[in-house]
Image (spheres, rainbow, N blue to C red):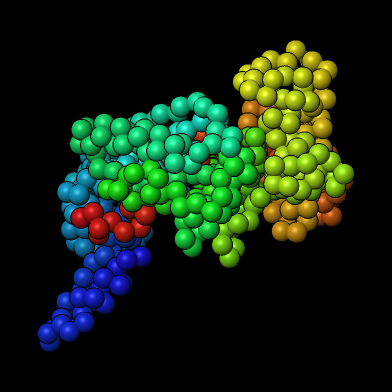
Amino acid sequence: MTAEPTTTQRTTGAPPGGSSASRQHTLRERNLRLVAKAIYDAAAGTSGPPDAVPPSRADVAAATGLTRATVSTLVDHLVAARLITELPPAAAQRAGRPAVPLVPAARTVVGLGLEVNVDYLGVRALDLAGQTVADVVEQGAFHDSEPATVLGRLGTLAAEVVELLQSDGMRVAGARLALPGLVDVRTGELEVAPNLGWSSLDPVPLLSLASLPVHVANEAKLAALAELAGEVPDSFLYVSGDVGIGAGIVVDRGLFLAERGWNGEVGHVVVDPAGPRCSCGAHGCLEQYAGKEAVLRAAGLPLDAPLRSLLAALEADDDAARAALHRAGRALGSALADFVNLTGVSTVVLGGVYAELEPWLRDDVVAVLRERVLASPFAEPDVRAARAGQHAALTGGAREVLREVVADPAAWV
């Protein structure tokens, strides 16, 4: 949060009475956060039934412990800042004025998700109501590509989206850039992305989006956060399958990042030391058995074939396609068994291309987990398809930007 450092700067050298004024200002910021969080949690279904009626001022006061007068004043500020919206009054359940439901504002403040992956660039904008207000995906081939060229093109796409949003009266709060590799969460630098051929890179300046705050994150981790909008356990492993295979570890609805955020590289877990050489330099990595290109190759399809070609072959009971998915499922189950044995997190969410391949992968993955996970007789492995949709990292990135808006609404009031 930025409230406390800002307060410290204001009280340094302040005249008598300044500390009291500062404390009052800090209290107001805290109360704004409480009110905004209560309204947004209700809309997200995290503080009650998903189909519950949006809260009124009285409901927010009851949820936060603040007085109704204080809540009413703060709600007025949030409405004026276009962070929340009042719906038409609900029918009165008892004597008195009807309650006015409060919901996140639509098409006012938006967050951007940006992504570079091996075969596409993407820009997606979400508003505070959770609606997608812009979505651009450009196909390409970015194996061993030039970072400046690729990120420059993504920056151009993002700038065009920002201009369109601003012309419609929306404010862009910032962006998250998703990359398929090791991102140092302390510096925002990309250490290595083997499938892109990139290393030791500060990607933000290459976007040329100087007026927009951009933070960098791993693609699979942002995609994992996108799943939190659906019905998932509080702790799970999200596996993002594409050419590469990444993972995001969610514990108690928050990302587990460890020291530098370099965890979750399940694609480089060795499943056969005598296996083929991987782009990372090792032999027998999971990506060589369950990565998209590896599966297409084993199915006898071109490496650039669309996923629908593989799905069509599977639906037609093609022997090579079925064998390729069996091989991939066994390898994936082997790698995931190590994770479950180490962490005890028994829910696995299959995302990326795995979400559509899940009907042909799941049985083999579950079978290996039952064979190799010590606790499986007592806690049945839960393997499910992701629900966040295509290019989930774009959605997760945009939502992370908006989460920060809700966490610090005073900056927008």
* Nearer to us in this view, 325 or 161: 161
Reply above or below: 6 against 143.
below
Does residue 204 appear in the picture of this structure?
yes
Residue 262 location, quadrant: bottom right
Does residue 44 appear in the picture of this structure?
no
Q: Measuring 78% from the left and 56% from the top, which residue is drawn there?
A: 341
Q: Measuring 76% from the left and 44% from the top, which residue is drawn there?
A: 285
Q: Position of residue 236 (x, y in %)?
A: 63, 50
Q: Measuring 29% from the left and 43% from the top, which residue is drawn there?
A: 172
Q: Position of residue 175 (x, y in %)?
A: 38, 46
Q: Position of residue 249 (x, y in %)?
A: 61, 53
* Nearer to us in this view, 119 or 387: 119
Left or right, 87 with reference to 258: left
Reply above or below: 1 against 214.
below
* Nearer to us in this view, 38 or 275: 275
- Quadrant in which the C terminus is drawn: bottom left
Q: Residue furthest bottom?
A: 16
Q: Measuring 40% from the left and 49% from the top, which residue is drawn there?
A: 204
Left or right, 281 with reference to 60: right
Q: Position of residue 283 (x, y in %)?
A: 80, 45
Left or right, 256 with reference to 320: left
- Quadrant in which the N terminus is drawn: bottom left
Residue 170 location, quadrant: top left
Left or right, 376 with reference to 10: right
